[in-house]
Amino acid sequence: MGSLSQGEFTRLDGTAMPHAFQLTTRSNDDDATPQTSNFACETEEECKEWETNIQRASRMETVQTMHLGGAYAQELAQFRLKVTNRRQKIADPACLNPVFKANLYKLKTEGNPLNPEEWFLRETWLAENGSLVYHSVKSDSDLVYYTSADVAKASVCKVAKEKSAMEFTFQVNLAPVDGIEYAPGLFAAEAAAMRDQWMEQFTRIAEGHVASEPAVQS
């Protein structure tokens, strides 16, 4: 399923279930298509609560805990917020000049890391203010993937070779915000040395330092 930040809630009339709705989610990934799922609640109050929280997520607001029946609570638990919630176009490019810049593979939203066709090579950089930025081929624009606040609180780790189609994969874990967890980001460098440098740069920023220019070009 795509991101709730791209979600559209539509009430369904004339169905077998009286409190049904359709959720359409989208992703910012290249070639991504909308995904549609149908749900039904036990009461009108529950349906309204789902509508309210989905609309909040689409406006990038925090999804509040919902006290629903067991099955619906499990559905909500599966809606782990994706990084697409936070992608944003750059209003002032001058404030995000690259310091550490190299090509980097990123896994598409909901992608299978073992499928090489679901990885996309993008020009990516850490900016002066600590944000992670990449050039989107789809929109032909530069987008902030992680804000400086995200990177400052993120942790990184290597991914085992058997768990990814890309040999030099690493994982970025964002810190929870108000109890809401974000799905880890998977990226892959073109060489082992470059992966080490990316991880070092993330750690530097988390420790309060600024990024530095890459010593090894990919």
Image (spheres, rainbow, N blue to C red):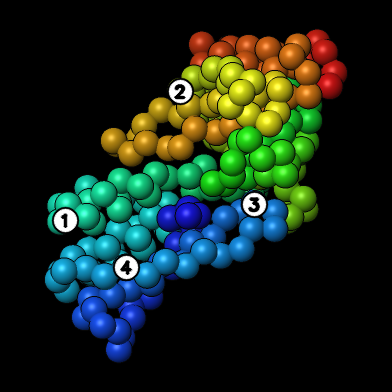
CA distance separating discs 4 and 1: 14 Å
The reply to whether residue 130 is visible in this rendering is no
Badge 2: residue crowd in 10 Å (few <14, some 14–19, many ≥20): some
Disc with the residue nearer the chain's start (3 vs 4)? 3
The reply to whether residue 165 is visible in this rendering is yes
Residue, disc 2: 153
- Say what secondary structure mark 2 lies in: loop
CA distance separating discs 2 and 3: 25 Å
The answer to whether the residue labelled 3 contacts the one labelled 4, judged by CB atoms less than 8 Å apart, is: no
Percent coordinates x, y for residue 31 in the rendering: 70, 58
On residue 29, which mark appears?
3
CA distance separating discs 3 and 4: 25 Å
Q: Find residue 188 and report its image quarter.
A: top right
- Looking at the rendered image, the disc whose residue lies closer to the viewer, 4 or 2, is 4
- Say what secondary structure mark 1 lies in: loop
On residue 68, which mark appears?
1
- Looking at the rendered image, the disc whose residue lies closer to the viewer, 1 or 2, is 1
